[in-house]
Image (cartoon, rainbow, N blue to C red):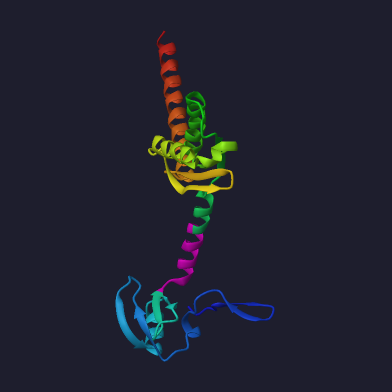
Amino acid sequence: MPGSGDTYEKGGAISVEPRINDRIRVPEVRLVGPNGEQVGIVRIDDALRLARESDLDLVEVAPQARPPVCKLMDYGKFKYEAAQKDRAARRNQAQTVIKEMKLRPKIDPHDYETKKGHIVRFLNGGDKVKVTIMFRGREQSRPELGFRLLQRLAEDIEDIGFVEYTPKQEGRNMIMVIAPLKKKSEVKGARSQQRRDRERRDAERAEAGAGEAAQD
């Protein structure tokens, strides 16, 4: 099944796909079978003959090797499955948002718990959080206050997030970035499952209620 591995654009040919079949013009190749088995170094004519006999394509998978590595495969099927996986990955991909939370180095306990609650909510939603400690006046000479606060926060949320960007002083601020342990796509999947479970329970309750009403 010969085919072209090149696409043409203005200015010349730009190869965007591997060379296959008669496009492979070298004396010999290192051949890999359709199931990954190592056939060894064979003449290109023999490799093409094996491809025709197996009703498969000869695909160059490592052109820089000496000799180039080629594999026997159904290239059309391979491209189709790769495109399907790519589309599925794009559908499941969720954009990670970076939220921001600002704290003062001498924050009171109530405000700390409130802001920590917001951070927990962001992380549980699959978003990263940029935590900024704002120093004012003489507080700038006490960076250890901000560092200890961020360290405490990191310990408080370690079951749902981790420090991706360690605390760093930037001018009057100290910044730390916390990332969620669960990816946003996983969070969305879990929420979808919870919604399906809730709908199933509601349907079961409604069915049970209808049955009791019929008995009455």
Q: What residue is rendered at 60% in x and 37% in y? A: 137
Q: In the depicted view, which residue is nearer to us: 203 or 163?
A: 163
Q: Visible in this render: residue 136?
A: no
Q: Main secondary structure of the magenta part?
A: helix
Q: In the depicted view, which residue is nearer to us: 83 or 94?
A: 94
Q: Is residue 81 magenta?
A: yes
Q: Is residue 115 magenta?
A: no
Q: What residue is rendered at 30% in x and 74% in y? A: 37
Q: Quadrant of the C terminus?
A: top left
View extreme (top): residue: 216
Whole-percent x and y of residue 151? 42, 40
View extreme (right): residue: 10
Q: How many marks?
A: 0
Q: Which stretch is magenta?
A: 73-85
User: Quick check: 42 above or below 97?
Assistant: below
Q: What residue is rendered at 50% in x and 39% in y? A: 142
Q: For residue 135, which quarter of the picture?
A: top right
Whole-percent x and y of residue 105? 51, 35
User: Quick check: 71 above or below 92?
Assistant: below
Q: For residue 181, which quarter of the picture?
A: top left
Q: In the depicted view, which residue is nearer to us: 140 or 132?
A: 140
Q: Visible in this render: residue 147?
A: yes
Q: In the depicted view, which residue is nearer to us: 192 or 20?
A: 192
Q: For residue 99, which quarter of the picture?
A: top right
Whole-percent x and y of residue 106? 51, 31
User: Quick check: 166 above or below 5?
Assistant: above
